[in-house]
Amino acid sequence: MLGLSIVPLSHLHTSEQQSSLLPARLMTKPLCFLVIVPCVLASLTHPPVPELFQNTLRRWNVQPLHDKDRLERWNRFVKFVKSVKETTSQIHLESLNGYTILNDAEFETVMKPIMTRSFNMSDMIVSDEEIENHPVTKREKRKKRALAAVSEMWEKEVGLTTPGDQAACGSCWSFPNVGTIEALTKKLSGELIKYSEQYFVDCTFTYSGCAGGTVNEGYKLTLMRQYMLSAKTWPYTADYAPCKWTADIESGNNNAMTKIWVQDYLPLSKTEEAVLGGLVHSPVAFGSYISDNIFGYSGGIYDDSLCATQATPHAMLLVGYTETTLRVKASYGTIFGDYGYINYKRGSPHLVSCRVYDTAFALTATWRREMEYTFCSEKKLVTRSECKDSCLAMNTDTETGWNLASIPTRYHNEQIVSMVNELYPGVKTDDKFNYLWMGLEDLDKDESLNWIDDFIPVNYVNITDWDSFGWGKIYGTINKNTGAYMMKGSLTATHRGVCGRAVTCWDISTAVANGDVTFDRERLTEGTVATPKCDSGYTLTGESSLRCVGGIWDKTLPTCTQNSGPQCQAPTITGGTVTPTTAISTGASYSVSCNSGFTLKGQSTVSCTESNGKATLSTLPTCEKDTVELKCEAPTITGGTVTPTTAISTGASYSVSCNSGFTLKGQSTVSCTESNGKATLSTLPTCEKDTVELKCEAPTITGGTVTPTTAISTGTSYSVSCNSGFTLKGQSTVSCTENNGKATLSTLPTCEKDAAPTCTKPVIAGGEVSPTDNEIAVGAVYTVTCNAHHKMKGEAEMTCSKSGDTAVLSAAPECEEETCDPKKAEITDGTIESGKKDRYVYGDKIVYKCNDNFVVEGNTAIECTGSKFSSNPPNCIAINTNCDQFTVTNGLLSNHYPYFSTDKVRVSCETDYIVAGKNPRICQNAGWKTDAPTCTKSDGEQCISLVPPQDGTITCTGQDNDKNVAGTQCTVGCLDTFQPIPGSISETTCSKNKFLWTHQTSSNPEGVFPPCTKMIAPTTKKVKIKVTIKAEYCTNDEQKTLMEEAVKAFLKDSLSITGLQNGKCEVSDVECVYKTEILLKFNVVQTQDLLDKSLLNEAKSEIKKSVKANTFTISIADGKRRKRRATTLSADSDSLESEDEVVCAEGEVVEDGVCVKCPAGYKTVNGACEACQIGTYNAAEGAIDCIACEGDKTTYGTGSTKQDQCYDLCTVPDIAAGTLNKEAGFKVEPTYTLTLSCEETYSASVASFQCSSYSSTQHKCNPLQQCKPSVVTLENGSISGAAAPYEQGEMVTFACNAQYKLIGDSAITCNNRVWSNAAPLCKPVNTACPAYAVTNGKVEDKSTTFVTAESVSVECDYGYDLNGTNPRVCETAGWTTAAQTCIKNEGKCPALTAPQHGTISCTGTSITDTCTVTCNAGYTYLGDTVKVTCQEGLRWTHQSYKNSRGDFAACAEVQTPESRVLEAELFLDVDYCRTEQEKTAVVSAFETYIKSAAAAVPCISGAKCTVQKTSCGNSDGSNKVTFELAQTAGELSAGSSTLTSSDSRIKDLVNTKAMSFGVTTSKKRATTTFTAEDGSYTGNVKTACADGQAQLSDSCIACPAGHKLVVGSTTVCSACPVGSFSTTANSNSCEECAAGLTTYGTGSTSSGDCLKLCKVPGVTHGTLTPPTGYNVPLDTSIKMTCNTGYILDTGSQEFVCSTGPVPTCKEDGVTEEVSGGGNTTTVVIVVVVVVVLLIALGVGAVIFLKKRKVKRVSGSGLEPAAVLVNKSAETNGHTTNENPYDTRI
């Protein structure tokens, strides 16, 4: 809250109220004043201080009353002269401002209240997160504005009102509010309106605006009301009164802000650049600290060092700047400063310490017009184009402007949301119904938003999701529930939509400078004509009329330019006004009118004429002052009467008489006389009260009693109580007071008859009571919930019970506020700079400062977070001056001067340099322990020298003469009583790749090892044991006691546990519970040597072994029986459960059974130590957060410990196809020179460049249209054809030497920078393997020579089966098996071949036999089925015209995906996540829960996944929570089973309402349990494959030869179509076979699969074997079988496929005569009719089956008509029929 109050100088004594000048004797002896002038004033000699004092008195018309008064003013003036000297520069002052000459009494009234008032400026500070997430901030970052254009725009070009005076009211915050909107109104409309600050003071808060306020609250108020009052309607009073304009505000009456809309307020980032950038939008309001020095400021450049010390908060308005100053408009009137302004010194550090940039806000606005909205379509869901067409269709000749809705402000945003929810309330489960199309779009692809009709600049847009859509034209929708906008890249999505139009155009009546605009109607609706007109002496340039069309003026506004030629200047008339006020041309005239109280003498018109080339005015009139009769107003006399009661003239008098009980003191006559032109009354008498005792009579109260019952004197009171069954309404005390001489009672209470007795809701400080009803009935309960950072003392529930005739509430609890221990805030060698208190509560901040020659280590400020501080106070470390500063050439230091004792300064050398000397260099009390290390040139073949971790050691093996050559291995260890940070590396190896250690990464470029942490003894250390005993015992207390004794004895004596025997451990908390069996629990607690990890481990191990071996047997002397006998109880061998528990002190974490404190450079996160990320550091142990580097500075890696490890660094870029001399992602100095080398077939654009100058367009590897030369190699052969470099289309041919065979392609071609295939090999011929041929089949390799290890397969012709082993292998000694043969297939399906990387298992090849294919481990099958059956027609079920031979599909290698996540969402049972604080609270609580044992999510509990991207409050609805479970890198190759089981587990938790977790709510500041809505969970496992991989279900595969990669939303692997092939894995395309060649089916892997084959033709009325469409060898014999009722017509039943001819079938023509005679013709006719009917039925069935898409019925021997319908299928890139030869109908 901000606010300062100042009494205006009119309250000072003036010359009219005082004696004249100071006596001459004082003026002639100024030395009596100079005695107290400090020496520093000697420099102010022009003029001297006494003369400066006199000038200031004269300037402000102040005459001291007497010597004391003058001395008081002089003393104060001298102090302000000193402050001016200290704070102001670059000015010559003739006088100072009016605040410098106050006397003591005036100072107490005016200044002291100002400087002692204290407000909390944090109310005006906006969080960095809110600033960064504000949509306008995001957009401004993308649009770098040039600031020079706005440096003086607002004051000099736009124009501002005169600075106002807040006077004695803390309303400084309201003046920037008004000033900003005044400036925006002037800029947009051309009209300078003085708005009312009093409106903000009275109508913003529920309390007095004079008590202080915040600028942002005023901005929010204007944003939602779109309403302002003018200062003329509501002048400033410097006082507060409850708002009387509520009705006008609601109705819009008296609104002075009629020409603009306020769109949004913009919190600015806390930098000078951002704050000055805000001037692009508006003058910038800000809050800052000031000191009383400011009241001496009288001009010049101001710079105050005391502002942060006195720290009085104050709000002002930044209106411009120069290179050296910030121009600020104040609220102290024009008597202050530079005519009401302050010129702050730009660049001064005091601007930062005084927080000038911390609380800055700008405002955005646009022109005001009336808007109209409606829905775009009667249909519920439409696409964007459908919605837009519907809007445009609403335009008519008389009503235009309809389009997709524009929403110019938050005010209209709420209108839209309200309108839609009236018709469609509630959050819908399908987001299609939650969003509506509107006219927002991104046309420029640079995230620059525009409305579709482009008539309103988009300054306010509440975007919730942007980055997920990337570049491209994107479009906006609005969430009907939240008002948030979501950008969409899809035009095919369907939503509801909103149309809108501007009903009126904006008011341009004052928008033309030096002119005005008139309209042909009052309301600026469609068709309104605007006529611009210029002032006299100006000429119109541009359009003479404009028309309102669709809410927009159809033409550009004209301008008024000044006429050339002589002009007359506007004259000045004392007591009158001249119109216009600007110069006029000859022929024009001025109009003169006199002010009130003045009379015009002369002509009211003054003409401008030309004479001798000069402009001359006619005779000027005058305004003479009227003679006014002076009168005195009737005075008021307390206790008396004045006659007459009206004003009287001078010379007359008033008569005064006193009322009864009063006596007159003074004259009864008061005269009215004239003095200095004013009417003045003589001294007034008084009416003093008589000493007469007045009394009040006792009143009567029905249903009650009044005490006492007698009369009482004034000043005393009656006490009223109600009878039983009555309740007091009003005050129980009735006072007797005097009023105009009479005794009067205060308002009487009443006693109202009770209904049923009730209990009244109590008020609990620091807590809330529910229900919120003020009263509850007997039996009901009030429940108390303590606010956050409060703890309850007492019972939470208060029950209302009856006691006699009344209701009584049980005792109320207390909510005690948590406090932080003041002792923990103490600091050594430093002081608390601000915030020191005896008692600290939540939110209290403490700022520390170290003594001289000490430096802060840790956080300079801490905050009380409830019961503890956010961190420990910082350490103040003494600077060791004995350790001087040093530098290293070709290297960097880990930390910089000043240095402290025990500091270790590590040297890191640049690339190609290594450290020479002791590293690190250690600072001791006496100075440096060793000489400074140096960086010497390396031979380039070794890694950098490593530095042991703090409190640790390093041991290396494989070094060469102390050089860390490739292969050197180093092991890291810790000293005694120290241990490594969890997860830190223990080994590293020098890699030959750029000679980097394996732990050197972009986050650790210097190869630093994490420090070792000191082991700390825990406060508690135990192991909890639970076993089950199947017996009946522990049914009473005696048995439980006996069991406890027996367990302790058994553990100590029988198991011989060391810790129990030596007393370092003990058994505690033995618990024995019997239900259907005994559950025995106990703890083994370590009491000594808590750092010894072995004691409890041994105890747990011994107990576990005993239970497993069935020796955990407890013998108890049972006392139940008359004769005591032992009861033996044995633990179930599988029942042991154990849990370790280690409790550490605050700020420590558990690691391996002991406690450690996270070292400097680390923070404590969820009970573990986490390194400070790049760009952050932390100097303190046990910290909970890291500190961000200032500005753009960052660190070289993670784990930085000091601020001086923050540098201006540059990140080494990652250049495609290129290599730099520094690893990509590493941090280097901005000037570091990077050298670039490129891969083969790439050319470097530059040889080297400085890191800071990197540009992706200038520094890159440009591809050459060449193929890699390294591919072209061949041993034992020769290469011919093209030579390197290999250009597009060039071919290389390979040939082998004698006795060598070429394996692979004999020629490869350069195509699009890639060789068509790999280079072949030349292998020696094995003469022991002769060539051979196969009858009725073909050998796969037709060559006459073979090489060792070569395998040769045989393919048999159709109708023949393989006999022998396939493939046949050539070994060194010859063929491993006999040659294969092909034998006639007699009633069997063809033999099948296993795919590469797979096997097949067959039951046989006869009809009904099956074959099953199985892929090897690590491979997956790409086919539709893994099991096939031999069927009628001797074909396998998977054979088709696309697979004539029945080849199995390929087995593809399964590869590790790039990532695999479970994307999930659910909805909470409450509406929450509306603010950033709420979102953070829910996300933190949810992640804690989902990771907990209670959730038992399989992949999390098994450490196989992590939780990421958790958010809540998305644009889909405020109660939605989204998150991901991401598989860890080591689990990606294991498949998705853990994610799918986790998905099932979470779904069960949600559907059974078991997913509940506590959240500290911001609303109640208490922990509230949230539960996931039943049925609201959805999850989807999503696998992301790397480039070059294909996706198959939730796995990634290498796409094998015979296939191609098809890129879409996911990349899939598709078999090459018939007639094409691919030879390599992961191919992007398939090659077509040469002309005349084709393949047996899909998935061919080489050009050798392309053969001259015959496609089996199609026939009618019959079937062929092999079937129609199959590809078979040319000489294959085809058999025709005619359908039933048909016989062979032409050709042979068998024919050769390639030669034919194809036979045909005809009807057999056989008819039968009817037995017993009769007419044969009749029978034939009947048969024909029946046949026709059957055909008709068949055709109907075909049509029916075609519509139903009936598939072939297996085994029927018939093919339904649906199978005969041609289907489109892709073959070789062309569209063909699925079976082009099947022509049956």
Image (cartoon, rainbow, N blue to C red):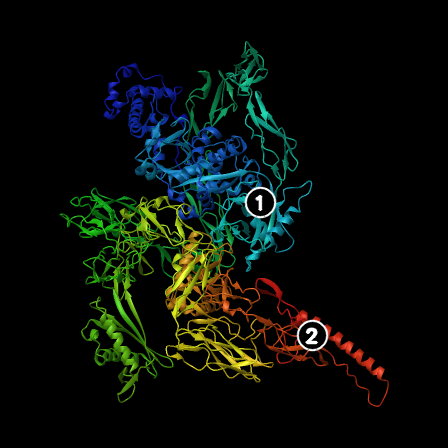
Residue picked out by circle 2:
1660
- Closer to the observer: label 2 or label 1? 2
Question: Within 10 angstroms of label 1, few (less than 14), some, or many (20 or more) residues?
Answer: some
Q: Is residue 843 visible?
A: no
The percent coordinates of residue 331 (x first, y second) are 42, 32
Q: Amino acid at mark 2?
A: Thr
Q: Residue 1549 appears at what percent x and percent y?
A: 46, 68
Helix, strand or loop at label 2? It is loop
Q: Position of residue 59 (x, y in %)?
A: 38, 20
> In the image shown, does 1411 or 1074 lie closer to the viewer?
1411
Task: Name the quadrant containing residue 517.
Answer: top right
How crowded is the residue under tag 2: few (<14 C-alpha within 10 Å), some, or many (20+)? some
Q: Quadrant of the C terminus?
A: bottom right
Question: Which residue bears the numbered disc 1?
Answer: 452
Residue found farthest to the top: 612
Q: Is residue 1600 above or below residue 256?
A: below
Q: Residue at x 21, y 42 (%)?
A: 852
